[in-house]
Image (cartoon, coloured by chain):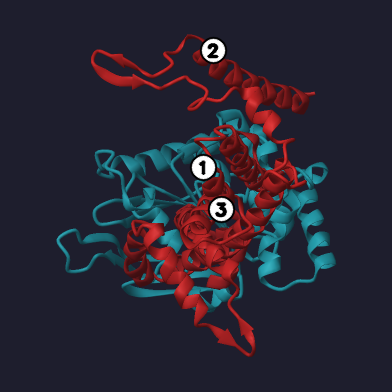
Chain colours: A cyan, B red
C-alpha cells in the first residue's frame, strides 16, 4: 500500500476574488511506504501548500488525497503523521522531555508511558542528557532534533517536514541530514520533505519532485539512484553529482518567480 | 548579594528624595515664586512643605488629643483595611479580565462586539460611578446575605483592574505563531486543549505587565471609592480626614499619604512575587 496517494489535486486560494491564486493544479503523486520524497521548486510553486494538503491543514479544491489509505482528515485525527517546520516551534515553557510528550498528552497517554516514550525518542535523537533542559538552553540544531523527536513521538508511519533545516548553518545542516536518514532507517518512516536546497534534496531522497509556479504543478520527478547506505562519502559520489545535475536541469526549465513571496512563505 | 544591593538602592533613593525636599525648603521662596511672570515655584514654608522629620515624628504622636492610639497604628490599620479591599478587587478584576479575554479570543464576533465597550467603560469617571454602585449594592440581598458596604469599594477597584488584564491577556492569547497553531491542529487538538497547552502559557509574558497595572489600578479604585462613598476604616478616608486638619497640622496628612504609597508597594510586591514564580523557567531576555 502506498503511504500517500494524490490524484489530480488542485488548490485555489480566494476563488472568484480578484486576488485568486491557483496554488496547485493537476498534481498526481504516489509515495510508497518507507520512501523518502523531496519537494523542490522556486517560491510560489506550492510545495508547502501540497504538504499542508497532505496534513489536512488545508482543504483541496479539486482532486483527492489518501494518507495510509484514509482521508487526510481521518489520518490527522489518528495522528498518522508527524510534522516539523523550519522554526522548531518548541514551547519555551516546557522542558525538552515535556515538549516531546505534548502530542502524547493530547492523546491522553498516562504519565509513565509518556515519560518512557519521551526518553526513547531522546535516545533516538541523541539528546538523552538534555531531557530536563529548556529549549532556549539548546543550540538551533539541537532544538530541531527535539522537534523531530516530537514529530516522531507517536511513532507515525509518515513524517511531513517543511524546510526543517532551512535556518541551520551548513555544517549543522549536513550533520542533521545524516541524523535524519539514520533515524528513518531505524524507524522505517516515510518522509515528505520540502526544501530549497538541491544537494539536500538529492542527498536525502529516493525521488525528488520538481515543481514550478503559476500555477503550481509538478514538472518532473527525478529518481536518485545512489547505491547502498548514504554516508558523508556519498557527497563525493558520482551518482550524487548526477542527481544534482538532473534536478538542476529540471529546475532550469522552470520559470523563476521574481522572488515574489509565495503563499508558502507565511 | 544582588538583592541586598537593590534594597540599598531603594533606601538610598528614598534618602535622596528627602534630601531634595529639605534642600528646596532651604533655598526655595517662602511664599512661592515667579519665573518669567508665571507662578511656578511652590511655596516652601512649613505650612506647605513640612520638614521630613516633622512628618516622621508625627507617626509616634497620638492621633487626637486625649487619645492613646498613635498615628502609625491608625495609618497601618487603614492601609491593611484598604489592602484587603484592593486585593479582593484585584482578584475579581483579574478573573473578569481573563474570562473576557478568553471569550474574545474564542469568538471574533465577541472581540468586535466587546472591545469598544471595554475602552468606553474606562472613560466613565469613577467618582460618578461610586454612588451608583453603592446604591445598587444596597438593594442586593440574597438568602439573608446582604451586600456589605466595603464590597462596593472592591467592585470599583475591580472595575479599574479588569481592563489592563483583559487587553493584555487578549494580546497574549493571540500571540502564538501561525506555526504553533498549525502544530496543535496537526495533533487534532481541540480548542480547549490549544487554550490550555498553548495560548494560556504563551500569554504569561503579556499578563505580567497587565497584572502590575491592575494591582495599582485596584488600589486607586479602592482609595477613590472610599473617599467618594465615605467608607470608614481605610486609608482613603484617613487622607481626607487628615487633609482637613492641614491648616493646623500640615505634617499629619503626609503620614496617611505615605500609608497609601506603602499599600501600593505591597500590592505591586505581591505581583512581582507572582511574576517571579510564573516566569521562573522562561528565557531570561524576556523578563528584562
Pointer 2 chain: B
Q: Residue B70: where, in percent of width, then height? A: 74, 42
- Along the viewing direction, whichever of B134 and A219 lies nearer the viewer: B134
Q: Residue B155: where, in percent of width, then height? A: 52, 66
Residue B131 location, quadrant:
bottom left
Q: Is residue B107 left or right of residue B141?
A: left
Q: Residue A236: where, in percent of width, then height? A: 59, 30
Q: Residue at x 24, y 65 (%)?
A: A14
Q: Secondary structure at mark 1?
A: helix
Q: Residue at x 44, y 56 (%)?
A: B167
Q: CA distance from mark 1 to mark 3?
A: 10 Å
Pointer 3 and pointer 2: residues touching (CB < 8 Å)? no
- Of the numbered discs in the image, which one, if any, rests on residue B23? 2
- Along the viewing direction, whichever of B216 and A178 lies nearer the viewer: B216
Q: Is residue A1 left or right of residue A73?
A: right
Give whichever of discs 1 and 2 has the lower sequence position: 2
Q: CA distance from mark 1 to mark 2?
A: 24 Å
Pointer 1 chain: B
Q: Residue at x 51, y 46 (%)?
A: A86
Can residue B220 be seen from the camera position used here?
yes
Q: Residue B3: where, in percent of width, then height? A: 76, 28
Q: Secondary structure at mark 2?
A: helix
Residue that mark 3 sits on: B237
Q: Residues within 10 Å of mark 3 (few under 14, many from 20)?
A: many
Residue that mark 1 sits on: B243
In this view, the residue farthest toward the left is A18
Amino acid at each position: 500500500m502506498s503511504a500517500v496517494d494524490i490524484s489530480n489535486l488542485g488548490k485555489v486560494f480566494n476563488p472568484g476574488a480578484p486576488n485568486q491564486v491557483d496554488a496547485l493544479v493537476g498534481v498526481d503523486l504516489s509515495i510508497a511506504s518507507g520512501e523518502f520524497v523531496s519537494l523542490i521548486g522556486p517560491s510560489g510553486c506550492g510545495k508547502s501548500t501540497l504538504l499542508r494538503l497532505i496534513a489536512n491543514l488545508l482543504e483541496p479544491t479539486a482532486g483527492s488525497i489518501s494518507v495510509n489509505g484514509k482521508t487526510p482528515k481521518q489520518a490527522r485525527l489518528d495522528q498518522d503523521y508527524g510534522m516539523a517546520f523550519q522554526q522548531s516551534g518548541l514551547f519555551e515553557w516546557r522542558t525538552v522531555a515535556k515538549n516531546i510528550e505534548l502530542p502524547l498528552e493530547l492523546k491522553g497517554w498516562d504519565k509513565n508511558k509518556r515519560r518512557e516514550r519521551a526518553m526513547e525518542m531522546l535516545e533516538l535523537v541523541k539528546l538523552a542528557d538534555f531531557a530536563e533542559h529548556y529549549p532556549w538552553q539548546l543550540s538551533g540544531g539541537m532544538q530541531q532534533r527535539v522537534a523531530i523527536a516530537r514529530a516522531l513521538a507517536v511513532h507515525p508511519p509518515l513524517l511531513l517536514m517543511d524546510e526543517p533545516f532551512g535556518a541551520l548553518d551548513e555544517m549543522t545542516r549536513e550533520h542533521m541530514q545524516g541524523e535524519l536518514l539514520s533515524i528513518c532507517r531505524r524507524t522505517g518512516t516515510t518522509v515528505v520533505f520540502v526544501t530549497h536546497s538541491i544537494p539536500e534534496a538529492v542527498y536525502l531522497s529516493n525521488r525528488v519532485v520538481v515543481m514550478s509556479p503559476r500555477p503550481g504543478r509538478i514538472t518532473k520527478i527525478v529518481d536518485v539512484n545512489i547505491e547502498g547506505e548514504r554516508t558523508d562519502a556519498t557527497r563525493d559520489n558520482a551518482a550524487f553529482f548526477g542527481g544534482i545535475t538532473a534536478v538542476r536541469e529540471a529546475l532550469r526549465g522552470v520559470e523563476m518567480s521574481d522572488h515574489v513571496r509565495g503563499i508558502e512563505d507565511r | 548579594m544582588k538583592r541586598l544591593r537593590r534594597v540599598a538602592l531603594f533606601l538610598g533613593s528614598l534618602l535622596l528624595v528627602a534630601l531634595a525636599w529639605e534642600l528646596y525648603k532651604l533655598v526655595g521662596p517662602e511664599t512661592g515664586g515667579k519665573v518669567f511672570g508665571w507662578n511656578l515655584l511652590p511655596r516652601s514654608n512649613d505650612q506647605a512643605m513640612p520638614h521630613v522629620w516633622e512628618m516622621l515624628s508625627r507617626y509616634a504622636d497620638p492621633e487626637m488629643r486625649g487619645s492613646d492610639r498613635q498615628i502609625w497604628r491608625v495609618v497601618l490599620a487603614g492601609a491593611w483595611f484598604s489592602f484587603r479591599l484592593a486585593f479582593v478587587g484585584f482578584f475579581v478584576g483579574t478573573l473578569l479580565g481573563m474570562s473576557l479575554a478568553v471569550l474574545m479570543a474564542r469568538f471574533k464576533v465577541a472581540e468586535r462586539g466587546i472591545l469598544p465597550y471595554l475602552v468606553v467603560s474606562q472613560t466613565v469617571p469613577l467618582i460618578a460611578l461610586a454612588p451608583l454602585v453603592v446604591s445598587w449594592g444596597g438593594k442586593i440581598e440574597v438568602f439573608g446575605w446582604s451586600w456589605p458596604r466595603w464590597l462596593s469599594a472592591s467592585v470599583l477597584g475591580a472595575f479599574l483592574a479588569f481592563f489592563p488584564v483583559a487587553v493584555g491577556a487578549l494580546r497574549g492569547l493571540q500571540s502564538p505563531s501561525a506555526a504553533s497553531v498549525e502544530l496543535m491542529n496537526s495533533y487534532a487538538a481541540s480548542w480547549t486543549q490549544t487554550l490550555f497547552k498553548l495560548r494560556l502559557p504563551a500569554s504569561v509574558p503579556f499578563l505580567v505587565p497587565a497584572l502590575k497595572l491592575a494591582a495599582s489600578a485596584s488600589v486607586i479604585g479602592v482609595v477613590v471609592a472610599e473617599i467618594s462613598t465615605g467608607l470608614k476604616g481605610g486609608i482613603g478616608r484617613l487622607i481626607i480626614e487628615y487633609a482637613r486638619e492641614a491648616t493646623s497640622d500640615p505634617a499629619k496628612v503626609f503620614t496617611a499619604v505615605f500609608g497609601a504609597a506603602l499599600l501600593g508597594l505591597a500590592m505591586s510586591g505581591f505581583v512581582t512575587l507572582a511574576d517571579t514564580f510564573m516566569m521562573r523557567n522562561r528565557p531570561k531576555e524576556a523578563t528584562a
